[in-house]
Image: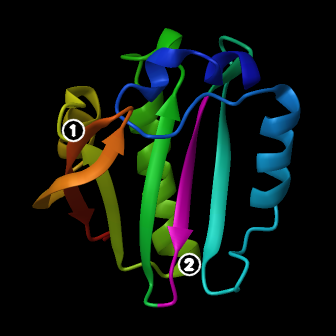
Amino acid sequence: MFEGLSDERLYEFVAERAPASLAALWDRYRMLASRKSPDGSEEWLNWALWSKADRQYVGFVQATVSTDRSAQIAYVLMSDHWGKGFAREAVTAMVTHLHEHYRVTRVLARVDTRNQRSIALLEVLGFERLAIHRHAEKIRGVWSDEAEYQIVPQ
């Protein structure tokens, strides 16, 4: 995961940076392994994506489940695996899992409006755009706008 997550192309549309070291990535994963926010109000779910064919990690998906039965999701796919259907398969499986095992009734995703690849993924999966949030996040000194999407699992 460290090598793939070190690719700067993954951080073009997010304020987050590549992990500073393998130890820093381990520390982050140890914190996430608790599966709960520090105050216990949210469940943190994270899955690493493994390609059987390529015999390597290709990315991750994650969800933050709130007590109101909504979930905020995020996903990162290593750039060498863009356009191969991994993200589509993983996000679909995650939404289904959230609905069936956590009784989630609404799944939300926010994406930088410049990230056309991610917007296309959400739209092909049936997410609907709810809003555009202007100046939502500052990314390397520049304000970005975010589109907010939602899907209601069936």
Q: Which residue does the numbered mark 2 point to in the structure image?
A: 102
Q: Which residue does the numbered mark 1 point to in the structure image?
A: 119
Kindly indicate the quadrant of the structure image that contains residue 120: top left
Q: Nearer the viewer, residue 97 or 58?
A: 58
The boundaries of the magenta stretch are: 59-67
Residue 65 image label: none
Nearest to the eye among marks 1 and 2: give it: 1
Side of 76 relative to 109 (left or right): right
Secondary element at tag 1: helix
Local crowd at mark 2 within 10 Å, few (<14), some, or many (≥20)? some
**Magenta: predominant secondary structure element?**
strand
Image quadrant occupied by the C terminus: bottom left
Secondary element at tag 2: helix
Type of the residue with mark 1: Ile
Q: Position of residue 139 (x, y in %)?
A: 36, 37
Asked whether the beta carbons under mark 1 and mark 2 sit within 8 Å of each other, the answer is no
Q: Position of residue 153 (x, y in %)?
A: 32, 69
Query: Is residue 98 part of the magenta span, yes or no?
Result: no
